[in-house]
Amino acid sequence: MTWGPLRRLARLTARLGLRRGTARTRFTALYVALFLLSGTALLAIAAVAASGGSRSSRTAHVDGTDQPATAAQARSRIDGLEQQLAQVHDNQSRQILIGSAIALGVMAVISVALGWFVAGRVLRPLRVMTATTRRITADSLHERLAIGGPGDEVKDLADTIDDLLGRLEASFEAQRLFVANASHELRTPLTTMRASLDVALAKPGPVPETTATLAARMRAELDRVDALLESFLVLARTQHGEFTDSARLALGHLTQTALSGRAKDIAARALTVRENRIDDSAWVWGSPTLLRRMADNMVDNAIAHNDPGGWISVAVRAEGGEAGAVSLVVESSGPLLDQRRVAELARPFRRLGADRTGTGQGSGLGLSIVAAIAQAHHGTLDLLARPDGGLRVTITLPRTDGSATAKTPDTETSVAT
C-alpha cells in the first residue's frame, strides 16, 4: 500500500519537473524527488519497527507460582503496568513519527535549495560553453572555448566543439580566399575579351551590322559578368568583416547620392520618387565604400523590380541618442510577393515574383550584399512584402554622434566621390 503513492509522486515529479523547464530545474526536481522517496521509505520502516515493538510489549506476560489470590492481584497489577507501558510506547512512537514527518518537510524545502545549488554547480561549465559559443560568429571563428579541468565528459564536449570551430574557420577562410582569388583572376580574361572586341570594331573599313550587334551584345554580357565579379568581391570582403576605410557618415547623404546618380534609370521607367523624410542627424560609423554600395543596391533593387510608372519611397530616420539607431527604409511598388518567401531574397541568387524569376536584369546578389554589409556594421535587414504589391526594405544600423565629424573634414569628400 505504501509504494502506490510513491510511484504516483515519482510520476508527477517527472511530468512537472523533468519534462519542462531548464536542465537545472529538471536536476533539482530529480534531487528533491529522490530525497522525498528515500525519506518516506525511512519513515515507513520506522513506523513498521515501532508497531512491531508495541505489539511485542502487549504480548509479554509474567509466570508466577504464588497463591491464587496473590497471583490474581499480581496479574492485575502487571496487566495495568503493561497497558500503561504500551500507551507510553504508542505516544512516543506517534511523537517520533510526527517529528520525523516535520523534519522531512523541512528537509524537503532545504533540499530544493541544495538541489538548485548543486545542479547549478554541475551545469556551470555547460553555461560557460553556451555563452562562449553564442558569442562566436563567422567573424570570430578564431575564438575557442578552452575549457579547463579534468578530462571528463564536459571537457571532451568542449574539445570537440573547439575542433569543430577550427574546421569551420578553415572552411570559411578557404571559401573567402577562393571567391576573392577567382574574382581577381577572372578579371584578366574579361579585360582581354573586351579589348579584343574594341580592336575588332576599330578596324578600318565598314563593320557588318550583324558583327556590330553581336559585339554590342557580348560587351553587355561582359559588363554584366564584370559587375557580378565585383559583387562577389564586395560580398567576400563584407563577410570577412575587415575594412580600414571607416568614417562617420550621414546616411541620408548617401541615399540622396544614390537617387541622384540613377535619375536616368528612374526617368526611363517613369517612376516617381517619394522622399518621406531624410533626417540630417542620422549619422553612422562604417566603411564609406560598403555603405555607399548598400544604398546603391537598395535603390537599384527598387528600380529594377518595379512596375512601369510606379513609385519609390525613401526615408532615413534617427532614433534615440548616440546609443540609438538609424534606419534606412526603401519602399517600392511592384508585383505581389509571398511574405513567407520574401526572407529568401537576402540569400544569394534568390529571386521572387514574375520580374525576379527570369534571367533578365540583376544577378540575385543585390539584397544579399545589403544583408552582409548591414551585418558587418552590426545592423539588421528587414524585408516586408507590401499588401498592395512591392517590397519594403529596412536597414537598421547603430547610431553615432554626428558632431564628431567636424574632426574629420574629409568625410563628406570621401562620401561624395
Image (spheres, rainbow, N blue to C red):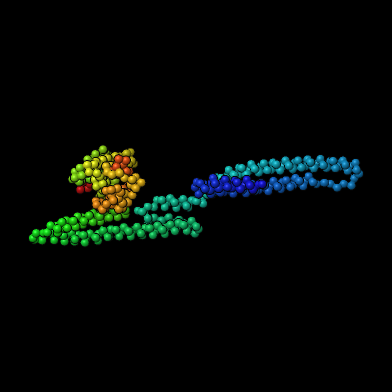
Task: Point out residue 251 in the picture as x, y percentages from the top left corner.
Answer: 26, 43
State the count of labels. 0
Residue visible at 69% across and 46% down in the picture: 47
**What percent of the width, then of the height, locates residue 280?**
25, 39
Which residue sits at x=19%, y=61%? 192
Query: Extreme left residue here?
Result: 205
In the image, residue 6 lies at what x, y percent? 62, 47
| Residue 169: quarter of image | bottom left
Q: Position of residue 14 (x, y in %)?
A: 55, 48
Instruction: Give the residue furthest to the right.
Output: 67
Q: Is residue 31 left or right of residue 65?
A: left
Residue 82 appears in the figure: yes
The one of 19 and 291 positioned closer to us in this rendering: 19
Q: Residue at x 12, y 59 (%)?
A: 208
The answer to which of 399 and 30 lies nearer the viewer is 30
Residue toward you, 343 or 143: 343
Side of 355 where 145 appears, left or right:
right
One can see residue 238 in this view? no
